[in-house]
Structures are given as C-alpha cells and as structure tokens.
Image (cartoon, rainbow, N blue to C red):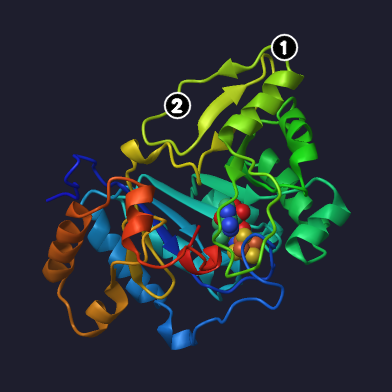
Amino acid sequence: MELIDKFGRKITYLRLAITDRCNLRCQYCMPAQGIDIVDRKELLSYKEMYRLTRVLSELGVNKVRLTGGEPFVRKDFVNFLESLSFNDKLDEINITTNGALISNYIDKLEALNINAINLSIDSLQKDKFAKITRRDVFENVYDTLEKLEESNLKLKLNVVVQSGFNTDEIIDFIELTKNKHIAVRFIEEMPFNGKGQRNIEEEWNFTKIIALVNEHYSTVEKLQDKKSSTSRNFKIPNYKGTFGIIPAFTRTICNDCNRIRITATGMFKNCLFDGGVFNVRDFMRDGASDDELKQLFIDTVHKKPKNGFVAEAARGNDVSESMSTIGG
Ligand code: SAM
Ligand code: SF4
C-alpha cells in the first residue's frame, strides 16, 4: 500500500506543524498582535503526532519535516524528536525553526541524527532583523547559525524576499556561502500572513531574484536539482556553499510534488494552497483504526490537486491564513 495521486506522484514527505504558537511575529507571517491561537486541547498531542507519522511511514512516507509555528516553543519537543527518531522507516527528520531558542540543543540534535535544519533568517542586520520579526533576537539567531555551521547537521537558511525590506541583502546572503557550507534559499513571499495587511510594492519573484544575481556575478553555475526539490539551485564558482530560489508563489515546482501537510490542529492538506481537506485529529479521536486511517490517506491523496493554482481556485476563499497555522 502506498500513497499515489491520480497524476502518478508518489507521496513520501510529510510536513507536520508542531504548534501554531510562535515567539516571533514576522511581518509576512502574522500581524503584530499575533494570531488567535487555538486552545491547547485542539492541538494534536505528541502521541497523536507519533501515531500519524507511524501510519504514514507504513504507507511509504520516509521523510518528515517538523515545523510550526515555532516547534521549539512547544514543551517537550526535543523528547518528541527522540521518540520519532526510533521510527526506522524514516530516513530523514528535518526541522524548520527560527533558531532563537535552540542554541543549547544543538548537541542533542546531532545525537538524534536529525538530518537538516532550515534556519529562517531574513536579514543579517540587527535592526532590520528586529523590524521584520518584531523581536530583538538577532544575536541568538546568528549564534545558532554559527553553531549549526560548525555542527554535523546540514544547514539551510530560509530567506523570505520582501520588497522594500531585504532585497538589498540578496548578495550579502550569497556572499555568506563563500566560506560557509550552507545552502541559502530565497523564498518568494506569499500572502499567508494572517491578514497582516502587507503593502507589497514590487513582486520579487524567481525571475527578478535571479536577474539581480546574474547582474552581480560574472558566472552563476546552475546545479542539478534533485527530483521533488522545492528550490532551483545555483552556486558561485569556488564558493563552499550554494544558493537556491523557492518559487513558492509562482508555483513552477508542483509537477514533482511529493508532499502532504498536517497542521497543528490535525488538518490534512494535500497542498499548501488548499483550504484543508479533513481533520485527521477528529477522525482519530472518534476511534479510527490504523487501517481506517490508511484508507482515508490513500483516498485523499488520490485527489491531490494538480498544482497550487488548481488548489487555490477550489478553496472558495482567499489565501490569507497565517503560515504559522499551516506549518510552512
Ligand atoms: N517558525 C519557524 C520558522 O520561522 O522557521 C517555522 C515555521 S515558519 C511558518 C516556516 C517558514 O515559512 C519560514 O522559513 C518562514 O520564513 C516561511 N514563511 C512564513 N510566512 C511566509 C510567507 N507569507 N511567504 C513565504 N514564506 C513564509
Ligand atoms: Fe514565527 Fe516562523 Fe511565522 Fe516568523 S515565520 S512568525 S518565526 S512561525
């Protein structure tokens, strides 16, 4: 039994949101006052998350990304990671984090064989960082960046390209790859901001970002992208690290999509842009067996929309929820 959609795409990757809570208030993700967080009992428990991951791993999911909200704000997250690491069907456990709370956990993450950390950092300038995140934690995050770079963990940096805020730092981020073994990934900003009323002057999409890079460097090497990679990847010759662009909003990557999402409240999503297909938490709490869960996953994945535009058109309302509730 495996998860295959009607276009022949095999699902092997789960993105699981650990919580909807966050210690930062990034402007592109939520309004200054934060979002209406749900009651704690509405969140999936760790036991429920463990079960869902186990059942999905029996259907061929071999890679999990833990995200949120900020996964490290949930109590006992590291213990949950440890339990998950005992699932021998999982080849990779990855985490997306803002890094502000984790510098003391890096040894533990190495010991648990966590595969890669995606660290979100949108500016290398303290003041600008504080303006974007609405919190003054640049030093903590940069400290995490340096410790992760020295560790055995693979390190990717997530940089949301924000018109009027950090486009002047695109080259600075690429210069970080000169001496560091990191992969910087520039992400197109999407309207998942919890109605944060963003005023986007210019759309910084893939084409515009790569044009700026090409203008600056005489040679930009195109790398072979892995199938199902969300980023188009490049390198400056002789630099240690690489950089990539994630066309999250222009959605030119959907053909090879291999992922599903489960939000912190247990909403199953076939696509980032769909409105949520069913609540797997309620199904479990109503007593569903493992076989019933599997059948539901198989049937639902079969209906996965062709791409993010089809998914968005089918949802009947605007894309405006905060990324922290979806699990970006
Ligand atoms: N709190 C963690 C963090 O920031 O890394 C994990 C959750 S966050 C929602 C996951 C990723 O989504 C981050 O890299 C963040 O920058 C990105 N993100 C959030 N809102 C976004 C938006 N509106 N457009 C594009 N990326 C967004
Ligand atoms: Fe929090 Fe991550 Fe959203 Fe920033 S992007 S507010 S760190 S969930």
Judged left or right of residue 148, residue 227 is left
Judged left or right of residue 86, residue 165 is right
Disc 2, ligand 1: is the CB inside 8 Å? no
Q: Quadrant of ligand 1?
A: bottom right
Which residue is drawn at the image coordinates 44% and 71% (left, top)?
264
Circle 2 or circle 1, nearest the eye: 1
Residue 178, compared with residue 80, is above or below; it is above
Residue 270: x %, y % from top left: 31, 57
- Using the image as rendered, state which of residue 303 and residue 16 is in the foreground: 303
Q: Which element carries disc 1, helix, strand or loop?
A: loop
Judged left or right of residue 48, residue 190 is right
- Amino acid at the residue labelled 2: Asp
Query: Residues under labels 2 and 1: Cα distance?
Result: 22 Å
Q: List the residue tagged with mark 1.
A: 218
Which residue is drawn at the image coordinates 64% and 41% (left, top)?
204
Residue 252: x %, y % from top left: 43, 36
Q: Picture quarter containing residue 133?
A: bottom right
Which residue is drawn at the image coordinates 39% and 76% (left, top)?
44
Mark 1 and mark 2 in contact (Cβ < 8 Å)?
no
Q: List the residue tagged with mark 2.
A: 225
- Amino acid at the residue labelled 1: Ser
Residue 205: x %, y % from top left: 59, 39
How crowded pointer 1 is (Cα within 10 Å; few <14, some 14-19, many 20+) is rated as few
Tell me which label, 2 or 1, sits earlier in the chain.
1
Q: Picture quarter containing residue 243?
A: top right
Residue 288: x %, y % from top left: 17, 77
Residue 156 in sight from this viewpoint: no
Which residue is drawn at the image coordinates 33% and 74% (left, top)?
48
Q: Picture quarter containing residue 134?
A: bottom right
